[in-house]
Amino acid sequence: MSYEKIFDDGVTSLESGDMATAARVFKECTRLRPGEYNAWLYLGIALTELEDYKDAIAALKECTKIDPNVPHAYTNLGIVYQKTNDMAEATRHFFKATKVDPTDINARLNLGMAYYKTRNKVMEALLEFKYVLEHDESIPDVWASAGLIFVDLQKKPFALHCFQKAESMGYKDPRVHRLVLDFKFDSVVPKNPFDPDVKETAFLPVKRDVAVQK
């Protein structure tokens, strides 16, 4: 059987959710062609799903040795470290991925979420969410997370807009829904932070912001 056929079988197993078979097949691929980036990458992904985090990290690090200028392994390493509650390493690898490719939406999204979870870099998180939403408006979790940061910044009109966008996409969170109801009760008028008249200031800290306040 050719390497290509073995690799395709691994992809089929991965896509069908048979992670044990996928891991076995991609491990064979790395034996046959130890310099193949995608074989190590998919092995790392399968092992992550199997919660074999130690071997997943080892596989993904092989990717970074083969080609350090591709972001996918760094992003997946960040995901593994996040699953092991090592947020410092997770953030470091997500950041590395964005440096390798600043246009990688998945890396920017994960970096923003990592910043937000650490709670000490909320402005950095908001700027990552801004970049993501400028390029893909279809991710409700990003709208909701941006909204919660706007709440912390006392920018209620922007928060309400973000929450309404998230809920319009099916996002469900009792805390967010309660905030929406409270804002409506207080007659807060939603304002899109991406509107041209406020975009330059909406994503700045409060002390520097002259945008609409409520």
Image (cartoon, grey):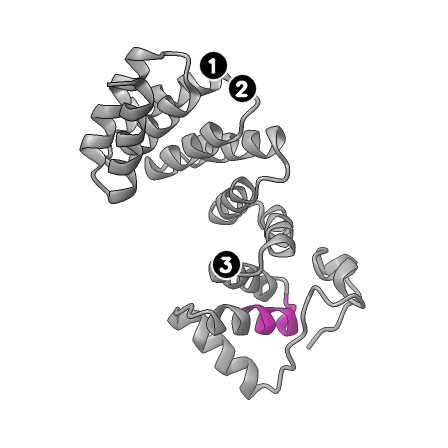
Instruction: Name the spot of residue 58 as percent of width and height, x first.
Output: 34, 19
Residue annotated with mark 2: 68
Q: Earlier in the sequence, mark 3 or mark 1?
A: 1
Task: Answer few, some or many: residues within 10 Å of disc 3's Cα (few below 14, many 20 plus, some between 14 and 19).
Answer: some
Q: Is residue 85 visible?
A: yes
The residues tagged by marks 1 and 2 sit, at their Cα atoms, a distance apart of 6 Å
- In reply to whether residue 161 is colored magenta, the answer given is yes
Tell me whether the residue at label 1 lies in contact with that at label 2, contact meaning CB atoms closer than 8 angstroms.
Answer: yes
Residue drawn at the location 58% of the way across and 66% of the way down: 151
Task: Give above or below for 8 relative to 106.
Answer: above
Task: Answer few, some or many: residues within 10 Å of disc 1's Cα (few below 14, many 20 plus, some between 14 and 19).
Answer: few
Residue 161 lies in quadrant: bottom right
Which mark identifies residue 139? Answer: 3
Q: Could you tell me the amino acid type at mark 1?
A: Lys
- Stretch of the chain drawn in magenta: 154-162
Instruction: Name the spot of residue 7 as percent of width and height, x first.
Output: 31, 26
